[in-house]
């Protein structure tokens, strides 16, 4: 909008010169009224669902920029990101491997004295806590009590993440069932031999021991072993029948 200086004559023959003036967020510049300027009084701009307010062409910010907020009266203000109560600069909620820090207290996200560090799990796992109250992923079978059962007729390496009960059928030849190293303490497996052949079934503890000093178990016909690990590749037989 252009604001020009005008001279007008009233009905009484008086000459009046009109000068463009602007304030409270507007500025007169070379005959134009332009947006921009100091506010000289509290100002309110009201929007609604139909008549909205948008700003286009904003520059991309950086991690050190301030955040635009409103106080309890709806007045716009800026604060630094680090000034948010209990805020942390670690991780990003938009990244795929972010760290979210909670820090116990009242179990609120912005409390300052607890820690929640979630790493990605695998398919069909549940997030739970262990005996040390640390958060970890567990297989569904470990939580619900349902056992994941597999049947093997050849050499096989047990999977910590999926296996609970392994049925072994050695009718077609000798079989070695390997329990790998690095299994989490407290994990247990049940291994049952189901055939009656003269072939051998060996339960091999890779890189570890069973019952203090042995490194393998020769599984007899129709025999069942349930073994549990203390951690550090140390295993114990808890049931044999």
Image (cartoon, rainbow, N blue to C red):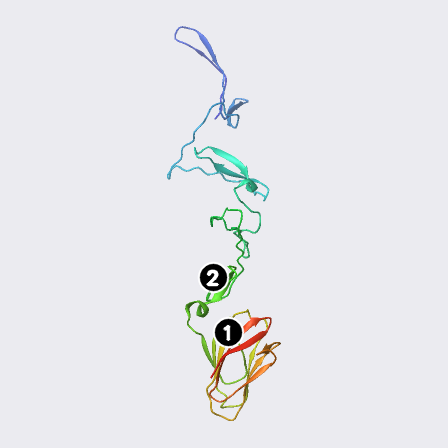
Q: Secondary structure at mark 2?
A: strand
Which of pointers 2 and 1 lies earlier in the amino acid sequence?
Answer: 2
Label 1 crowding class (10 Å Cα cut-off): few <14, some 14-19, many 20+? many
Q: Nearer the viewer, residue 10 or 164?
A: 164
Q: Nearer the viewer, residue 227 or 26?
A: 227
Q: Which residue is mark 2?
A: 128
Residue 231 quadrant: bottom right
- Using the numbered discs, state the Cα–Cα distance from disc 2 to disc 1 in whole angstroms: 18 Å
Q: Position of residue 94 (x, y in %)?
A: 52, 52
Residue 3, disc: none
**Position of 82 relative to 149 (above/below):** above
Residue 96 quadrant: bottom right
Residue 188, disc: 1
**Position of 102 relative to 232 (above/below):** above
Label 2 crowding class (10 Å Cα cut-off): few <14, some 14-19, many 20+? few
Q: Position of residue 143 (x, y in %)?
A: 44, 67
Q: Nearer the viewer, residue 142 or 56?
A: 142
Q: Position of residue 41 (x, y in %)?
A: 47, 23
Q: Are marks 2 and 1 in contact (CB under 8 Å)?
A: no
Total numbered labels: 2
Q: Position of residue 78 (x, y in %)?
A: 53, 36
Q: For marks 2 and 1, give the one nearer the viewer.
A: 1
Q: Secondary structure at mark 1?
A: strand
Q: Residue at x 54, y 76 (%)?
A: 236
């Amino acid at each position: 909008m252009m604001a020009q200086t005008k001279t007008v004559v009233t009905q009484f023959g008086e000459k009046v010169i009109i000068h463009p003036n602007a304030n409270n967020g507007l500025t007169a510049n070379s005959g134009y009224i332009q947006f921009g300027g100091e506010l000289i009084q509290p100002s309110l701009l009201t929007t609604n669902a139909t008549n909205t307010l948008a700003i286009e062409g904003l520059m991309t910010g950086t991690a050190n920029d301030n955040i635009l907020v409103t106080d309890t009266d709806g007045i716009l203000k800026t604060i630094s990101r680090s000034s948010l109560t209990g805020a942390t600069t670690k991780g990003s909620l938009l990244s795929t491997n972010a760290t979210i820090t909670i820090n116990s207290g009242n179990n609120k996200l912005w409390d300052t004295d607890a820690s929640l560090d979630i790493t990605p799990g695998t398919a069909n796992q549940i997030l739970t806590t262990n005996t040390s109250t640390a958060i970890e992923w567990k297989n569904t079978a470990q939580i619900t009590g349902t056992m994941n059962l597999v049947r093997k007729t050849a050499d096989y390496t047990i999977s910590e993440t999926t296996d609970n009960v392994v049925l072994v059928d050695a009718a077609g030849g000798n079989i070695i069932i390997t329990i790998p190293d690095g299994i989490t303490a407290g994990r247990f497996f049940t291994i049952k031999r189901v055939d009656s052949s003269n072939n051998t079934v060996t339960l091999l503890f890779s890189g570890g021991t069973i019952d203090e000093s042995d490194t393998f178990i020769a599984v007899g016909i129709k025999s069942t072993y349930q073994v549990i690990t203390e951690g550090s590749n140390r295993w114990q037989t808890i049931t044999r029948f």
